Amino acid sequence: MTASVVRTQGAPRSAAKGDRSPRGTGRRRRRLQASGLPWILPALVLGIGLIYYCIGYTGYISLLNWDGLSPEPEWVALHNYVRIFQDPVFWKAVSHTIVFFIVTFGLQTVFGLVFAVMMHSKIKLGVLYKVIVFVPVVLAPAITAPVFRQLFAANGQFNWLLEHIGLGFLAQPWIGQESTALPVIMVITIWQWTGLTFVLYFAAMSQIDQSMIEAARIDGAGNLRTLISIIWPSVRGTTVALAILSAIGALKTFDVPWLVTVAGPNNATQFLGTYIYQTTIQLAHAGYGAALSVILLVVALGMAIIFQTAGRERSEKSTIRKGAR
Amino acid sequence: MFEVRSRWGKALLQLAATVFVLPFLFPLIVMVQGSFAGAGWGNYSAVLGVPGFFRFFLNSAIISIGVIVLVYAVTMLASYGFAKLHIRAREVYFWMLLVCLTLPEVVLLTPLFSTAQQLGLYNTYLSVILPLAALQVPFAVLLTRNFINGLPDEMFEAARVDGANSFRGFLYLVIPLTRPIAAAVLIFTLIGAWNDYLMPLVFLQSQNMQTITLVPQFFVGEFSNDQTKVLASAVLTAIPEIVAYLCLQGLFERGLSAGAIK
């Protein structure tokens, strides 16, 4: 469909001809300069059109007291925002997001790195191990959620396991109490995404110059020393990219806390995503939900800008390399 | 990387790797074992016997294919335009797209919901396909544009000299040469669309429209919380994903890694 639109306009042809042609006259070049536009137009309509329209609409709704359906919403200006900053549940969600990011990112990094090093060390059954660790990445969180609800229930398999390895005194209703619900959500997330961390580190380590490692060994460096002084600095680009990925993932978190603990008990696993869903859909406070969305958006954008300025060149290099392989 | 020479050291490393993998295997074992508890295979036949069970797969497939086709077409055209054609204020458009990279989908909920209802798109495939595709396009364009930038200009010049217009250049150069990156785009778009939960949850109300990510919840209602059958349904919905991954291991790992580095 899009292709035929482009063809009938006929502009791209002249663009290709005129783009770098030294003979093009001024008038002709001017006519040609706009002509790459039809090619990017579908993407702009879909991406910018739909998304920017939604963002603008959300910004407007955030100034209303609206249930999402009534034809006459009440204009309340910035009242929703004022309420948010006084809302203890909002601050709870923010603090959960921060804790969640630090813990999941830290542990995934350690696990992914160590496992990648192990897999580079001539281990038997390596392919099988790799598949087992990566399978969770492919599975939908919505599909695995009931498994974890069962696993961490009071009479679930995790408590059964604890009893059978002599740690029965630790058994408790993991998802039913406030103190352990958030750690459970983090464990599930780590289980899900370590495979991806591992694959990225594994690829990054393949790029390390082997002679550097050999030189370190000749100089008497042990395994741990090599890991800390050679391997860890060599994969720093991957670590930075993973930090950004985890931070954005933490902001987007919805599926797991919603399906495993329904953001409870008593908001113990409330995240921004679940809170927006709850207020907008379940409580029908569309205005308040929209204001929450705007705040989430601003935070995500801030992170995107940090990423674009700090890590853009590196990510472009790595994506080209990846694509070429 | 780790150099272990002694036999004990080797055994220890093997043991460490095995112990490391076990926690990852444990939930999968619980899932399969739980699905056989009680009625055994009966759980599976009960799940398969629910009328319209395959409908969930069909819906997920329709939505995934729709998203993939849309993302692929739009991405290829735009990446070629951005990389090799002249566009005034090109970088402005590009940055406007890039801004959408980190957008959490929950932010789009309210406006999409009311717009979909006004346009009569509520409870249609399109109400899920369009936002999912829109969220995937910025990154797919970033990735593909970088890839096409890496193709030599001389090749496009040569095609031009031979009389190919830019559409033919697109058809005979860009499409075949971008296959590696297109495979990566395809995989992360597929996983993103197939595994998405929020959009179908909000926009697909009637049961015959729902996707596989809504299956567990559907069975919680259907079997009044009989966990064994819920787990059997989870196993059945997980199987296609695991089989697809095992068949295309390298492609999945590359595609998801590329998709991750947003």
Image (spheres, coloured by chain):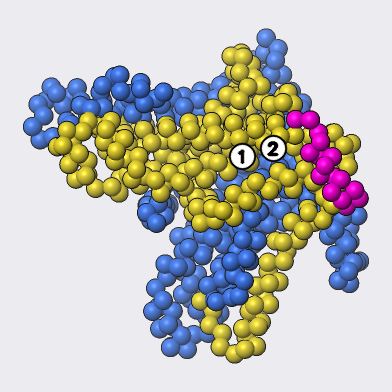
Chain colours: A blue, B yellow
Q: Residue at x 56, y 53 (%)?
A: B247
Across the whole image, how many numbered discs are drawn on residues?
2
In this orientation, which residue lies closer to the viewer: A95 or A200?
A: A200
Q: Quadrant of the C terminus of chain A?
A: bottom left
Q: Is residue B113 left or right of residue B163?
A: right
Q: Chain of mark 2?
A: B
Question: Is residue B107 in the magenta section?
Answer: no
Mark 2 — residue? Answer: B212
Q: Nearer the viewer, residue A54 or B40?
A: B40
* Residue at image location 49% in from the left, 42% down from the top: B186
Residue B165: x %, y % from top left: 22, 30
Q: Assign the N terminus of chain A to one quadrant of the image.
A: top left
Give, as a three-letter code, the residue at label 1.
Trp
Q: Residues within 10 Å of mark 2 (few under 14, many from 20)?
A: many
Q: Marks 1 and 2: in contact by CB < 8 Å?
A: yes
Q: Which residue is mark 1?
A: B194
Question: Which amino acid type is shown beneath numbered disc 2?
Answer: Ile
Classify mark 1: residues with Cα within 10 Å, few (<14), some (14-19) or many (20+). Answer: many
Look at the numbered disc 2 and give the secondary structure of its residue. Answer: helix
Range shown magenta: B37-52
Q: Is residue A202 left or right of residue A33?
A: right
Q: Tell me what residue is drawn at x 21 percent, y 44 percent.
A: B155
